[in-house]
Image (cartoon, rainbow, N blue to C red):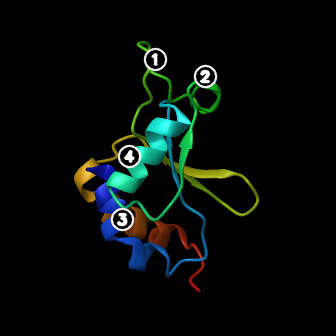
Amino acid sequence: MQCKALRDSAREIKSFDVAYFMASVDTLEDNTAFAAEHEAGFPILADPEKTMVDAYGALMGVGFANRWTYYIGVDGKVLKIDKATKPATAGKDLTRTMEELGFPKL
């Protein structure tokens, strides 16, 4: 559902000068198939060793990743972490928050 919400908001998201992606603890093969099945149109990073997820503090105790959205500025600083990401509205929420944070538009 989150992937579809981002896919469906692609035009609005791409009006910002940003790179965006999803990350998953699944394998590259699983993520590639998932992205194709859902016509993602953006990268889905594979982190089966859970290195990145753990470094960002998003690893749940059972080995899954929380569905959090990180907003990172051009200087690499985390501007906001949305820990209440709603899969169904993720695309609209992303564009609204980028607007609020003053992300540059193309």
The mark nearer the N terminus, 4 or 3, is: 3
| Residue that badge 1 annotates | 63
- Observer-nearest of 72 and 8: 8
The mark nearer the N terminus, 2 or 3, is: 3
Which label sits in the foreground, 2 or 4?
Answer: 4
Dot 4: element: helix
Which label sits in the foreground, 1 or 2?
Answer: 2
Which label sits in the foreground, 4 or 3?
Answer: 4
Q: Amino acid at mark 2?
A: Glu
How crowded is the residue under tag 2: few (<14 C-alpha within 10 Å), some, or many (20+)?
Answer: few
Q: Amino acid at mark 3?
A: Arg
Q: Amino acid at mark 1?
A: Gly
How far is the residue under mark 3 from the one under mark 1?
26 Å
| Residue that badge 3 annotates | 7
Q: Are marks 2 and 3 in contact (CB under 8 Å)?
A: no
The mark nearer the N terminus, 3 or 1, is: 3
- Observer-nearest of 76 and 10: 10
Task: Residue at 26% x, 58% y: name it.
Answer: 89
Dot 2: element: loop
How far is the residue under mark 1 from the one under mark 2?
10 Å
Which of the labelled discs sits on residue 49, or is there none? 2
- Observer-nearest of 84 and 61: 61
Q: Are marks 3 and 1 in contact (CB under 8 Å)?
A: no
Which of the labelled discs sits on residue 34, or is there none? 4
